[in-house]
Image: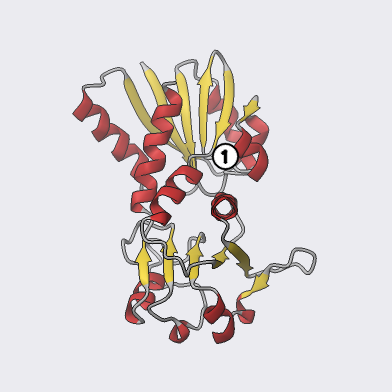
Amino acid sequence: MRRYGLLGYPLTHSFSQRYFTEKWEREGVTDCSYSNFSLQDIGELTEVLADPLLCGLNVTIPYKEKVLSFLDERSPVVTEIGACNCIRILGGRRVGHNTDVVGFEQSLVSKLGGHHREALVLGTGGAAKAVEYVLRKLGIGYRLVTRRPRPDTGDMGYEQVDERVLEGHTLIINTTPLGMHPHVEEAPPLPYGALTSRHYLFDLIYNPARTLFLQRGEERGAVVENGHEMLILQAEESWRIWNV
């Protein structure tokens, strides 16, 4: 039996466990199982990794950066961005990959217009690092927006995002958990009244399908996309990596 799983905390629901279980049933894969590893502390991962049948892990909030110290090897993308959301374990060696990059890029470009050349990235965690990588690859300029900006980074505080800033940044990507179930009444603090049909709002959250962030964009005529397709794409990329 080959064992796989999802590392994160808290794991109140798991797209990955359901997705892979249903995928294996459809495809007649009978020698694989998928578990959730909801660990309050990254140190608990040592016990999980001691399982000799464990072949791979997906990694989500808040461990995409903290998991790096457990790797024996990193893919070039993980080395560059400092975030890992997929681990392949083969012969006892743990190799870190980042499938967020693949999933985000392929999902983003389907609705990307020629005028979406400047972006605001909300959040600075592991998911934001994957988003930054893709934006650089596509030649899209961006600024990071965070609740705790540091003078040495050039990041913006939410209070700095006014109508003028939104006018110049028509692509807005939410990488924070604001609005995620069960806290569906939350949304990044932005001047949503300044949004127009030229804006494209992308939310990495998939539950609910329409966060308050996306709803407010839709009300202003903006193009919107949630994280569901991105999740499917990154899950398929994980499966490919585990079976190379």
Residue closer to the observer: 33 or 102: 102
Residue 162 visible, this angle = no
Q: Find the residue positioned furthest to the right.
A: 152
Number of on-image labels: 1
Q: Residue at x 45, y 17 (%)?
A: 53
Viewport quadrant of the C terminus: top left
Q: In the image shown, does 209 or 17 lie closer to the viewer?
A: 209
Q: Which residue: 45% across, 72% down?
A: 187
SS at badge 1: loop
Q: Is residue 158 visible?
A: yes
| Residue labelled with disc 1 | 84
* Residue 131 location (% of width, % of height): 54, 54
Find the residue positioned furthest to the top: 91
x and y percent of residue 89 in the render? 52, 22
Horizontal side of 102 relative to 168 (left or right) equals left
State which quadrant residue 17 falls in.
top left
Q: Is residue 220 above or below residue 147?
A: below
